[in-house]
Amino acid sequence: MIATYQRISRADGDLGKDGKDKSNSIENQKELIQRYISHKESLQNLPVMDFVDDGYTGSNFDRPGFQKMMDGVRSGEIDTIIVKDLSRFGRDYIGVGEYMEQIFPLLGVRLISVNDNYDSNNYNGATLGMDLVVSNLVNTMYCRDAGKKLRTANRVKWRKGISTASSAPFGYQFDPNKKGSYIIDPPAAKIVRRIFDLAILGLGTREIAMTLNDENAPVPSVYNREHKAYGKETTYTIAPVILWDSTRVWKILTAYVYTGAMVLGKSQRLISGKPISRTVPKGQQYITEGTHEAIVSREEFEKAQLVINNRNKVVMGSVDFPLKGKVRCGNCRRAMGYDYKQTSPIFWCREGQELIGQTKCSSEIFQANDIENAVFQVLKKELSLLGSLYGDIKKEEQSLKEASRKASRRKTSMEQELKNLKGEKMRMYEEYAAGTLSLDNYKNKKQEYDRKIAEVQDKIEQSKAEEAAQSVVPGTVRAAAEQAENFLHGTRLTASMVSAFIENVYVHEGGRIVVQFKYEQSIQDAVRALHTD
Protein backbone atom coordinates (compact mmCIF):
# COMPACT_ATOMS: atom_id res chain seq x y z
CA MET A 1 0.00 0.00 0.00
CA ILE A 2 1.09 3.58 -0.73
CA ALA A 3 0.93 6.18 2.05
CA THR A 4 0.82 9.83 1.02
CA TYR A 5 1.82 12.24 3.77
CA GLN A 6 0.95 15.95 3.93
CA ARG A 7 1.84 18.42 6.68
CA ILE A 8 1.51 22.16 7.23
CA SER A 9 2.21 24.33 10.26
CA ARG A 10 2.05 28.01 11.08
CA ALA A 11 4.72 27.49 13.75
CA ASP A 12 7.29 26.43 11.16
CA GLY A 13 6.58 29.46 9.02
CA ASP A 14 4.77 27.31 6.45
CA LEU A 15 1.93 29.84 6.29
CA GLY A 16 2.14 33.41 5.13
CA LYS A 17 1.00 36.59 6.88
CA ASP A 18 -2.60 35.99 5.89
CA GLY A 19 -2.50 32.46 7.31
CA LYS A 20 -2.49 30.95 3.81
CA ASP A 21 0.16 29.42 1.60
CA LYS A 22 -1.19 27.96 -1.61
CA SER A 23 2.10 26.27 -2.51
CA ASN A 24 2.21 24.32 0.74
CA SER A 25 -1.51 23.85 1.35
CA ILE A 26 -2.73 20.34 2.10
CA GLU A 27 -4.78 20.39 -1.10
CA ASN A 28 -1.78 21.41 -3.19
CA GLN A 29 0.39 18.69 -1.66
CA LYS A 30 -2.26 16.05 -2.37
CA GLU A 31 -2.71 17.23 -5.95
CA LEU A 32 1.03 17.20 -6.67
CA ILE A 33 1.45 13.69 -5.20
CA GLN A 34 -1.57 12.31 -7.08
CA ARG A 35 -0.23 13.76 -10.32
CA TYR A 36 3.12 12.11 -9.63
CA ILE A 37 1.47 8.73 -9.01
CA SER A 38 -0.57 9.01 -12.21
CA HIS A 39 2.66 9.39 -14.24
CA LYS A 40 4.45 6.44 -12.60
CA GLU A 41 3.37 3.10 -14.00
CA SER A 42 4.88 1.19 -11.06
CA LEU A 43 2.66 3.11 -8.62
CA GLN A 44 -0.59 2.89 -10.51
CA ASN A 45 -3.43 0.54 -9.51
CA LEU A 46 -2.04 0.30 -5.94
CA PRO A 47 -4.21 1.21 -2.93
CA VAL A 48 -3.45 4.67 -1.57
CA MET A 49 -4.07 6.03 1.93
CA ASP A 50 -3.69 9.72 2.88
CA PHE A 51 -2.16 10.79 6.19
CA VAL A 52 -2.43 14.46 7.18
CA ASP A 53 -1.06 16.64 9.98
CA ASP A 54 -2.69 20.04 9.65
CA GLY A 55 -1.24 22.55 12.11
CA TYR A 56 1.70 20.49 13.44
CA THR A 57 5.34 21.56 13.56
CA GLY A 58 7.97 19.67 11.60
CA SER A 59 10.61 20.12 14.30
CA ASN A 60 9.65 16.77 15.87
CA PHE A 61 7.79 13.59 14.89
CA ASP A 62 5.18 13.66 17.65
CA ARG A 63 2.30 14.15 15.20
CA PRO A 64 -0.90 12.06 15.13
CA GLY A 65 -1.01 11.57 11.35
CA PHE A 66 2.67 10.66 11.16
CA GLN A 67 2.45 8.21 14.05
CA LYS A 68 -0.64 6.56 12.54
CA MET A 69 1.26 6.17 9.25
CA MET A 70 4.22 4.62 11.10
CA ASP A 71 1.86 2.12 12.77
CA GLY A 72 0.93 0.99 9.26
CA VAL A 73 4.62 0.76 8.34
CA ARG A 74 5.44 -1.36 11.39
CA SER A 75 2.50 -3.68 10.73
CA GLY A 76 3.72 -4.25 7.16
CA GLU A 77 0.61 -2.71 5.63
CA ILE A 78 2.51 0.24 4.12
CA ASP A 79 5.61 -0.25 1.99
CA THR A 80 5.77 3.09 0.11
CA ILE A 81 5.63 6.67 1.43
CA ILE A 82 5.33 9.71 -0.84
CA VAL A 83 5.74 13.35 0.25
CA LYS A 84 5.80 16.63 -1.67
CA ASP A 85 9.28 17.41 -0.31
CA LEU A 86 11.39 16.46 2.69
CA SER A 87 10.39 19.57 4.65
CA ARG A 88 6.83 18.15 4.76
CA PHE A 89 8.23 14.90 6.18
CA GLY A 90 10.14 16.80 8.88
CA ARG A 91 12.52 19.65 9.62
CA ASP A 92 14.79 17.80 12.07
CA TYR A 93 18.11 17.26 10.29
CA ILE A 94 19.20 14.19 12.28
CA GLY A 95 15.74 12.67 12.60
CA VAL A 96 14.93 12.82 8.87
CA GLY A 97 18.36 11.38 8.08
CA GLU A 98 17.81 8.44 10.42
CA TYR A 99 14.48 7.59 8.80
CA MET A 100 16.03 7.77 5.32
CA GLU A 101 19.28 5.95 6.13
CA GLN A 102 18.34 3.53 8.89
CA ILE A 103 14.69 2.97 9.69
CA PHE A 104 13.09 2.76 6.24
CA PRO A 105 15.86 0.60 4.66
CA LEU A 106 15.61 -1.86 7.56
CA LEU A 107 11.81 -2.01 7.24
CA GLY A 108 11.91 -2.27 3.47
CA VAL A 109 9.95 0.95 2.95
CA ARG A 110 10.32 3.00 -0.21
CA LEU A 111 10.44 6.78 0.38
CA ILE A 112 9.72 9.23 -2.44
CA SER A 113 10.14 13.01 -2.18
CA VAL A 114 8.68 14.48 -5.38
CA ASN A 115 10.19 17.97 -5.45
CA ASP A 116 13.56 16.73 -4.20
CA ASN A 117 13.63 14.17 -7.05
CA TYR A 118 14.43 11.51 -4.45
CA ASP A 119 13.37 7.86 -4.69
CA SER A 120 15.02 5.42 -2.28
CA ASN A 121 14.66 2.65 -4.92
CA ASN A 122 17.16 4.55 -7.07
CA TYR A 123 19.44 5.33 -4.14
CA ASN A 124 22.97 3.89 -4.46
CA GLY A 125 23.25 2.99 -0.75
CA ALA A 126 26.51 4.81 -0.04
CA THR A 127 25.70 8.12 1.57
CA LEU A 128 23.05 10.73 1.12
CA GLY A 129 23.68 13.08 -1.74
CA MET A 130 25.16 16.40 -0.66
CA ASP A 131 22.07 18.24 -1.92
CA LEU A 132 19.80 16.20 0.36
CA VAL A 133 22.14 16.60 3.34
CA VAL A 134 22.15 20.36 2.80
CA SER A 135 18.37 20.34 2.30
CA ASN A 136 17.82 18.58 5.63
CA LEU A 137 20.18 20.98 7.39
CA VAL A 138 18.46 23.99 5.82
CA ASN A 139 15.06 22.69 6.98
CA THR A 140 16.38 22.51 10.56
CA MET A 141 17.79 26.04 10.43
CA TYR A 142 14.61 27.30 8.75
CA CYS A 143 12.51 25.97 11.61
CA ARG A 144 14.63 27.86 14.13
CA ASP A 145 14.62 31.02 12.05
CA ALA A 146 10.82 30.88 11.79
CA GLY A 147 10.59 31.20 15.56
CA LYS A 148 12.64 34.42 15.48
CA LYS A 149 10.44 35.84 12.72
CA LEU A 150 7.31 34.96 14.68
CA ARG A 151 8.61 36.81 17.75
CA THR A 152 9.39 39.87 15.63
CA ALA A 153 5.90 39.79 14.10
CA ASN A 154 4.39 39.53 17.57
CA ARG A 155 6.20 42.67 18.74
CA VAL A 156 4.74 44.60 15.81
CA LYS A 157 1.25 43.51 16.87
CA TRP A 158 1.93 44.33 20.53
CA ARG A 159 2.83 47.91 19.61
CA LYS A 160 -0.61 48.19 18.01
CA GLY A 161 -2.36 46.72 21.06
CA ILE A 162 -3.20 43.42 19.33
CA SER A 163 -3.04 40.33 21.53
CA THR A 164 -1.22 37.21 20.29
CA ALA A 165 -2.12 35.11 23.34
CA SER A 166 -3.85 31.75 22.95
CA SER A 167 -6.45 32.68 25.58
CA ALA A 168 -8.03 35.86 26.88
CA PRO A 169 -7.59 36.97 30.53
CA PHE A 170 -10.18 35.67 32.99
CA GLY A 171 -13.21 37.94 32.67
CA TYR A 172 -12.83 38.44 28.92
CA GLN A 173 -13.29 36.56 25.64
CA PHE A 174 -11.71 37.17 22.27
CA ASP A 175 -13.79 39.51 20.11
CA PRO A 176 -14.99 37.45 17.09
CA ASN A 177 -15.26 40.65 15.04
CA LYS A 178 -11.86 42.12 15.87
CA LYS A 179 -8.88 39.78 15.92
CA GLY A 180 -6.61 40.10 18.94
CA SER A 181 -9.10 42.18 20.95
CA TYR A 182 -11.23 41.37 24.01
CA ILE A 183 -14.90 41.60 24.92
CA ILE A 184 -16.37 41.06 28.38
CA ASP A 185 -17.39 37.54 29.43
CA PRO A 186 -20.26 38.45 31.82
CA PRO A 187 -20.18 35.47 34.28
CA ALA A 188 -16.40 35.62 34.69
CA ALA A 189 -16.36 39.43 34.76
CA LYS A 190 -18.87 39.30 37.63
CA ILE A 191 -16.33 37.31 39.70
CA VAL A 192 -13.53 39.75 38.81
CA ARG A 193 -15.78 42.68 39.78
CA ARG A 194 -16.60 40.93 43.07
CA ILE A 195 -12.89 40.57 43.88
CA PHE A 196 -12.24 44.28 43.33
CA ASP A 197 -15.35 45.25 45.32
CA LEU A 198 -14.19 43.17 48.30
CA ALA A 199 -10.70 44.65 48.10
CA ILE A 200 -12.05 48.20 48.01
CA LEU A 201 -14.19 47.37 51.06
CA GLY A 202 -10.98 46.54 52.89
CA LEU A 203 -10.55 42.76 52.74
CA GLY A 204 -7.10 41.29 52.22
CA THR A 205 -6.33 38.70 49.57
CA ARG A 206 -6.69 35.78 51.99
CA GLU A 207 -10.07 37.04 53.22
CA ILE A 208 -11.25 37.56 49.65
CA ALA A 209 -10.15 34.03 48.73
CA MET A 210 -12.09 32.52 51.61
CA THR A 211 -15.16 34.61 50.74
CA LEU A 212 -15.06 33.38 47.14
CA ASN A 213 -14.70 29.79 48.32
CA ASP A 214 -17.70 30.24 50.63
CA GLU A 215 -19.65 31.57 47.64
CA ASN A 216 -18.53 28.59 45.50
CA ALA A 217 -17.07 30.92 42.87
CA PRO A 218 -15.01 28.85 40.36
CA VAL A 219 -11.30 29.62 39.93
CA PRO A 220 -10.26 30.65 36.38
CA SER A 221 -8.99 27.21 35.33
CA VAL A 222 -12.20 25.49 36.42
CA TYR A 223 -14.36 28.18 34.80
CA ASN A 224 -12.45 27.94 31.51
CA ARG A 225 -12.80 24.16 31.49
CA GLU A 226 -16.53 24.23 32.25
CA HIS A 227 -17.23 26.92 29.66
CA LYS A 228 -14.77 25.62 27.02
CA ALA A 229 -13.20 29.07 27.09
CA TYR A 230 -10.46 28.13 24.66
CA GLY A 231 -12.90 27.29 21.89
CA LYS A 232 -12.12 23.61 21.43
CA GLU A 233 -13.29 20.32 22.84
CA THR A 234 -10.84 18.86 25.34
CA THR A 235 -10.94 15.68 27.39
CA TYR A 236 -10.25 16.24 31.08
CA THR A 237 -9.65 13.76 33.85
CA ILE A 238 -11.41 14.17 37.18
CA ALA A 239 -9.28 16.47 39.32
CA PRO A 240 -9.45 17.45 42.99
CA VAL A 241 -11.43 20.57 43.89
CA ILE A 242 -9.39 23.71 43.19
CA LEU A 243 -10.01 26.65 45.52
CA TRP A 244 -9.19 30.33 45.53
CA ASP A 245 -6.06 31.32 47.42
CA SER A 246 -4.14 34.55 48.03
CA THR A 247 -2.02 34.14 44.91
CA ARG A 248 -4.97 33.74 42.54
CA VAL A 249 -6.73 36.75 44.03
CA TRP A 250 -3.53 38.84 43.95
CA LYS A 251 -2.98 38.07 40.26
CA ILE A 252 -6.42 39.42 39.38
CA LEU A 253 -6.17 42.49 41.62
CA THR A 254 -2.81 43.46 40.08
CA ALA A 255 -3.81 42.82 36.44
CA TYR A 256 -3.95 46.22 34.75
CA VAL A 257 -5.82 44.67 31.80
CA TYR A 258 -9.09 45.03 33.75
CA THR A 259 -8.91 48.84 33.35
CA GLY A 260 -9.39 48.40 29.58
CA ALA A 261 -5.70 48.48 28.67
CA MET A 262 -3.88 45.82 26.65
CA VAL A 263 -0.75 44.63 28.47
CA LEU A 264 1.50 42.48 26.25
CA GLY A 265 5.05 41.14 26.19
CA LYS A 266 5.02 40.42 29.93
CA SER A 267 7.45 37.50 29.69
CA GLN A 268 10.37 36.56 27.48
CA ARG A 269 11.64 33.08 26.63
CA LEU A 270 15.34 32.81 27.39
CA ILE A 271 16.15 29.66 25.40
CA SER A 272 14.37 28.87 22.14
CA GLY A 273 12.39 25.64 22.28
CA LYS A 274 12.54 25.45 26.11
CA PRO A 275 9.96 26.64 28.66
CA ILE A 276 12.47 28.88 30.42
CA SER A 277 11.33 32.49 30.63
CA ARG A 278 11.71 35.66 32.68
CA THR A 279 9.27 38.40 33.60
CA VAL A 280 9.81 41.57 31.58
CA PRO A 281 10.00 44.77 33.70
CA LYS A 282 6.82 46.88 33.45
CA GLY A 283 8.70 49.70 31.75
CA GLN A 284 9.57 47.37 28.86
CA GLN A 285 6.11 45.85 28.42
CA TYR A 286 3.74 46.96 25.64
CA ILE A 287 0.77 48.80 27.22
CA THR A 288 -2.01 50.29 25.08
CA GLU A 289 -4.82 52.15 26.85
CA GLY A 290 -8.50 51.90 25.90
CA THR A 291 -8.39 48.81 23.69
CA HIS A 292 -11.43 47.12 25.25
CA GLU A 293 -14.23 47.65 27.78
CA ALA A 294 -13.02 48.02 31.35
CA ILE A 295 -14.31 45.87 34.19
CA VAL A 296 -13.05 48.37 36.80
CA SER A 297 -12.16 52.03 36.49
CA ARG A 298 -8.59 53.30 36.76
CA GLU A 299 -9.47 54.91 40.11
CA GLU A 300 -10.94 51.66 41.46
CA PHE A 301 -7.87 49.75 40.32
CA GLU A 302 -5.53 52.17 42.11
CA LYS A 303 -7.70 52.07 45.23
CA ALA A 304 -7.53 48.26 45.28
CA GLN A 305 -3.72 48.43 45.02
CA LEU A 306 -3.55 50.70 48.07
CA VAL A 307 -5.83 48.43 50.06
CA ILE A 308 -4.05 45.13 49.33
CA ASN A 309 -0.67 46.73 50.08
CA ASN A 310 -1.87 48.16 53.38
CA ARG A 311 -1.28 45.79 56.28
CA ASN A 312 -3.91 47.55 58.43
CA LYS A 313 -6.95 46.23 56.59
CA VAL A 314 -10.39 47.70 57.10
CA VAL A 315 -12.58 45.06 58.74
CA MET A 316 -15.77 44.26 56.87
CA GLY A 317 -18.96 43.71 58.82
CA SER A 318 -20.59 45.06 61.92
CA VAL A 319 -18.48 44.95 65.10
CA ASP A 320 -21.64 44.45 67.15
CA PHE A 321 -22.82 41.38 65.26
CA PRO A 322 -19.80 39.24 64.23
CA LEU A 323 -21.64 35.89 64.60
CA LYS A 324 -24.52 36.78 62.28
CA GLY A 325 -25.87 33.63 60.61
CA LYS A 326 -23.41 31.37 62.44
CA VAL A 327 -25.19 30.65 65.76
CA ARG A 328 -27.39 27.53 65.63
CA CYS A 329 -29.38 25.41 68.05
CA GLY A 330 -27.40 22.37 69.18
CA ASN A 331 -30.51 20.19 68.89
CA CYS A 332 -32.40 21.16 65.71
CA ARG A 333 -29.28 22.71 64.05
CA ARG A 334 -31.32 25.65 62.78
CA ALA A 335 -30.13 29.26 62.94
CA MET A 336 -31.10 30.88 66.23
CA GLY A 337 -33.13 34.04 66.52
CA TYR A 338 -31.25 37.24 67.32
CA ASP A 339 -32.54 40.47 68.86
CA TYR A 340 -30.05 43.32 68.55
CA LYS A 341 -32.49 45.95 69.84
CA GLN A 342 -32.10 44.81 73.41
CA THR A 343 -29.71 46.61 75.76
CA SER A 344 -27.84 43.32 75.79
CA PRO A 345 -28.48 41.43 72.48
CA ILE A 346 -29.84 37.91 72.86
CA PHE A 347 -30.08 34.58 70.98
CA TRP A 348 -32.81 31.95 71.28
CA CYS A 349 -34.05 28.82 69.47
CA ARG A 350 -37.33 29.62 67.71
CA GLU A 351 -38.58 26.04 67.95
CA GLY A 352 -37.67 25.86 71.64
CA GLN A 353 -39.60 29.06 72.33
CA GLU A 354 -42.64 28.18 70.22
CA LEU A 355 -42.98 24.48 71.13
CA ILE A 356 -42.15 24.45 74.83
CA GLY A 357 -42.58 20.92 76.15
CA GLN A 358 -43.05 19.49 72.66
CA THR A 359 -39.41 19.54 71.54
CA LYS A 360 -35.99 18.75 72.90
CA CYS A 361 -34.78 22.20 71.91
CA SER A 362 -34.06 24.52 74.83
CA SER A 363 -36.34 27.47 75.51
CA GLU A 364 -33.53 29.36 77.20
CA ILE A 365 -32.45 32.83 76.15
CA PHE A 366 -28.71 33.26 75.70
CA GLN A 367 -26.78 36.50 75.99
CA ALA A 368 -24.91 37.36 72.80
CA ASN A 369 -21.94 38.64 74.79
CA ASP A 370 -21.65 35.33 76.65
CA ILE A 371 -21.66 33.36 73.39
CA GLU A 372 -19.18 35.68 71.70
CA ASN A 373 -16.80 35.61 74.68
CA ALA A 374 -16.92 31.81 74.84
CA VAL A 375 -16.35 31.53 71.08
CA PHE A 376 -13.46 33.97 71.28
CA GLN A 377 -11.73 31.90 73.98
CA VAL A 378 -12.09 28.73 71.90
CA LEU A 379 -10.96 30.56 68.77
CA LYS A 380 -7.79 31.84 70.48
CA LYS A 381 -6.76 28.24 71.13
CA GLU A 382 -7.42 27.37 67.48
CA LEU A 383 -5.43 30.42 66.35
CA SER A 384 -2.55 29.37 68.59
CA LEU A 385 -2.65 25.88 67.06
CA LEU A 386 -2.71 27.35 63.54
CA GLY A 387 0.14 29.71 64.44
CA SER A 388 2.27 26.77 65.53
CA LEU A 389 1.20 24.86 62.42
CA TYR A 390 2.23 27.81 60.23
CA GLY A 391 5.74 27.61 61.71
CA ASP A 392 5.90 23.94 60.76
CA ILE A 393 4.53 24.72 57.30
CA LYS A 394 7.24 27.34 56.69
CA LYS A 395 9.92 24.86 57.80
CA GLU A 396 8.53 22.27 55.39
CA GLU A 397 8.39 24.86 52.60
CA GLN A 398 12.00 25.84 53.25
CA SER A 399 12.99 22.18 53.11
CA LEU A 400 11.06 21.72 49.86
CA LYS A 401 12.67 24.83 48.36
CA GLU A 402 16.16 23.60 49.23
CA ALA A 403 15.41 20.16 47.77
CA SER A 404 13.95 21.85 44.69
CA ARG A 405 17.07 24.02 44.25
CA LYS A 406 19.32 20.97 44.46
CA ALA A 407 17.14 19.09 41.99
CA SER A 408 17.16 22.12 39.67
CA ARG A 409 20.97 22.25 39.74
CA ARG A 410 21.17 18.52 38.98
CA LYS A 411 18.66 18.95 36.16
CA THR A 412 20.62 21.86 34.65
CA SER A 413 23.84 19.84 34.77
CA MET A 414 22.19 16.82 33.16
CA GLU A 415 20.52 18.95 30.49
CA GLN A 416 23.97 20.20 29.53
CA GLU A 417 25.22 16.61 29.47
CA LEU A 418 22.24 15.66 27.28
CA LYS A 419 23.02 18.54 24.93
CA ASN A 420 26.64 17.39 24.66
CA LEU A 421 25.59 13.80 23.94
CA LYS A 422 23.19 14.91 21.22
CA GLY A 423 25.92 17.11 19.77
CA GLU A 424 28.32 14.16 19.67
CA LYS A 425 25.62 12.04 18.07
CA MET A 426 25.04 14.69 15.41
CA ARG A 427 28.78 14.96 14.65
CA MET A 428 28.99 11.18 14.42
CA TYR A 429 26.13 11.16 11.92
CA GLU A 430 27.85 13.86 9.87
CA GLU A 431 31.00 11.68 9.75
CA TYR A 432 28.89 8.78 8.54
CA ALA A 433 27.11 10.96 5.97
CA ALA A 434 30.50 12.21 4.75
CA GLY A 435 31.76 8.63 4.34
CA THR A 436 34.48 8.82 7.03
CA LEU A 437 32.65 6.42 9.38
CA SER A 438 31.53 2.93 8.35
CA LEU A 439 27.91 1.85 8.73
CA ASP A 440 28.74 -0.83 11.32
CA ASN A 441 30.74 1.60 13.46
CA TYR A 442 27.98 4.18 13.13
CA LYS A 443 25.32 1.68 14.27
CA ASN A 444 27.38 0.55 17.26
CA LYS A 445 28.21 4.07 18.38
CA LYS A 446 24.66 5.29 17.79
CA GLN A 447 23.32 2.46 19.95
CA GLU A 448 25.69 3.44 22.77
CA TYR A 449 24.80 7.13 22.50
CA ASP A 450 21.07 6.30 22.46
CA ARG A 451 21.53 4.30 25.67
CA LYS A 452 23.40 7.15 27.38
CA ILE A 453 20.85 9.71 26.20
CA ALA A 454 17.97 7.57 27.54
CA GLU A 455 19.71 7.27 30.93
CA VAL A 456 20.28 11.01 31.18
CA GLN A 457 16.68 11.74 30.13
CA ASP A 458 15.41 9.42 32.87
CA LYS A 459 17.55 11.26 35.44
CA ILE A 460 16.24 14.61 34.18
CA GLU A 461 12.64 13.44 34.60
CA GLN A 462 13.47 12.24 38.12
CA SER A 463 14.98 15.64 38.96
CA LYS A 464 11.92 17.39 37.54
CA ALA A 465 9.69 15.34 39.84
CA GLU A 466 11.89 16.23 42.84
CA GLU A 467 11.94 19.88 41.76
CA ALA A 468 8.13 19.96 41.58
CA ALA A 469 7.50 18.16 44.89
CA GLN A 470 4.41 19.58 46.60
CA SER A 471 3.67 20.28 50.24
CA VAL A 472 1.60 17.74 52.17
CA VAL A 473 -0.45 20.69 53.43
CA PRO A 474 -3.49 21.71 51.32
CA GLY A 475 -3.60 25.29 50.12
CA THR A 476 -6.71 26.06 52.19
CA VAL A 477 -4.96 24.98 55.39
CA ARG A 478 -1.86 26.98 54.57
CA ALA A 479 -3.97 30.07 53.87
CA ALA A 480 -5.83 29.64 57.17
CA ALA A 481 -2.59 29.16 59.13
CA GLU A 482 -1.01 32.17 57.45
CA GLN A 483 -4.06 34.31 58.17
CA ALA A 484 -4.18 33.18 61.81
CA GLU A 485 -1.04 35.21 62.54
CA ASN A 486 -3.01 38.39 61.79
CA PHE A 487 -5.48 37.64 64.59
CA LEU A 488 -3.29 36.05 67.27
CA HIS A 489 -3.13 39.24 69.32
CA GLY A 490 -6.76 40.27 68.88
CA THR A 491 -8.66 41.36 72.00
CA ARG A 492 -12.22 40.65 70.84
CA LEU A 493 -14.19 38.61 68.33
CA THR A 494 -14.55 40.31 64.93
CA ALA A 495 -16.51 39.59 61.77
CA SER A 496 -13.26 38.94 59.89
CA MET A 497 -12.24 36.26 62.39
CA VAL A 498 -15.63 34.59 62.11
CA SER A 499 -15.61 34.75 58.30
CA ALA A 500 -12.12 33.31 58.09
CA PHE A 501 -12.24 30.47 60.61
CA ILE A 502 -15.71 29.61 61.93
CA GLU A 503 -18.22 27.47 60.09
CA ASN A 504 -20.93 27.33 62.75
CA VAL A 505 -21.47 27.77 66.50
CA TYR A 506 -23.86 25.29 68.16
CA VAL A 507 -25.50 26.31 71.45
CA HIS A 508 -26.82 23.45 73.61
CA GLU A 509 -29.06 23.44 76.67
CA GLY A 510 -27.39 25.03 79.67
CA GLY A 511 -25.27 27.25 77.47
CA ARG A 512 -22.79 24.58 76.38
CA ILE A 513 -21.13 25.78 73.18
CA VAL A 514 -19.50 23.74 70.39
CA VAL A 515 -17.56 25.64 67.72
CA GLN A 516 -17.23 24.05 64.27
CA PHE A 517 -14.13 25.41 62.57
CA LYS A 518 -13.53 25.55 58.84
CA TYR A 519 -11.20 22.90 57.37
CA GLU A 520 -11.12 21.04 60.73
CA GLN A 521 -10.37 17.63 59.23
CA SER A 522 -7.83 19.05 56.77
CA ILE A 523 -6.01 20.83 59.60
CA GLN A 524 -5.84 17.64 61.67
CA ASP A 525 -4.56 15.71 58.65
CA ALA A 526 -1.91 18.38 58.02
CA VAL A 527 -0.70 18.24 61.63
CA ARG A 528 -0.37 14.45 61.44
CA ALA A 529 1.39 14.60 58.06
CA LEU A 530 3.94 17.20 59.21
CA HIS A 531 4.78 15.24 62.35
CA THR A 532 5.05 11.82 60.74
CA ASP A 533 8.65 10.67 60.36
Image (cartoon, helix red, strand yellow):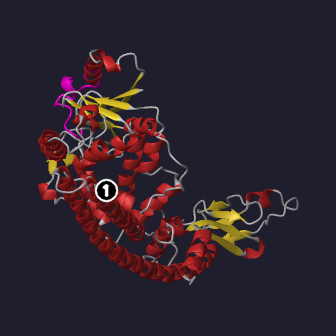
Magenta span of residues: 11-28
User: Taking 291 as reference, is 348 left or right?
Assistant: right
- Of residue 321 and residue 245, the one placed in the foreground of this image is 245
The quarter of the image holding the N terminus is top left
**Residue that mark 1 sits on:** 443
Q: Amino acid at mark 1?
A: Lys
**Residue 425 in picture, x, y percent from top left:** 25, 59
Residue at the image position 34 percent from the left and 31 percent from the top:
81
Any part of residue 491 in sight: no
- Of residue 476 and residue 496, the one placed in the foreground of this image is 476
Magenta residue check for 210: no
User: Taking 23 as reference, is 223 left or right?
Assistant: right
Residue at the image position 16 percent from the left and 31 percent from the top:
17
Q: Secondary structure at mark 1?
A: helix
- Of residue 42 and residue 3, the one placed in the foreground of this image is 42
Question: Which image quadrant for residue 67?
Answer: top left
Magenta residue check for 23: yes
Disc 1: CA contacts within 10 A as few (<14), some (14-19) or many (>=20): some
**Residue 338 in picture, x, y percent from top left:** 64, 61
